[in-house]
Image: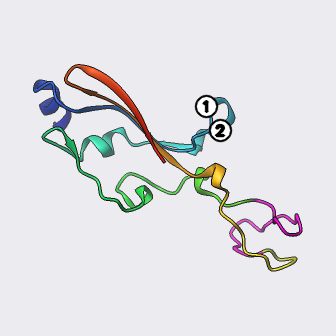
Amino acid sequence: RRKAEEEARNALVILSASYGSAQPAVQRQPDDVLDVTDSLMAKVRQSQLHISNAPKSTLLGFGRRHSERKASTCPNCSSAFVEDSNFCRRCGEERPQDPSLAPVLQIRYRFGGVEYSRTFG
């Protein structure tokens, strides 16, 4: 309904939106990206997207994905981390977040008849 209202006014329409891995499609796993087009379109009011500054994973329709996983090997001793562990079982080093796996929000939208694309990190 919201999309039809915005289209009728030639206003803001979210054409596609994905949340997850920023890696090229050929390098990522199928579950690394979540389609959040409908979730974002539901937050459009009078040509404005109303979302908070809270982490995007807390928004309805956004979930924890593979792209938010932490490093798989210890930077101190190179031992493999146990899947859900936050510390190395060998040396006790804290498991770091892998910055190359940080999720991004990619949006393609139309406003005033012109298509745009933006990526938020």
Whether 97 is among the magenta residues is no
Give the residue at mark 1. 25
Could you tell me residue 55's position as x and y percent? 42, 60
Q: CA distance from mark 2 to mark 1?
A: 5 Å
Left/right placement of residue 87 relative to residue 14 reads: right
Main SS, magenta residues: loop
- Amino acid identity at mark 1: Ala
Residue at x 68% of width, y 69% of height? 84
Q: Is residue 88 left or right of residue 2?
A: right
Write down the region rendered in magenta. Answer: 72-87
Q: How many numbered discs sit on the rendered protein?
A: 2
Q: How is the image coloured?
A: rainbow
Q: Which mark is residue 28?
A: 2
Per the image, label 1 sits on a secondary structure element best described as helix
Q: Quadrant of the N terminus?
A: top left
Image point 60% across, 38% down: which residue?
30
Q: Residue at x 35, y 38 (%)?
A: 37
Amino acid, disc 2: Arg
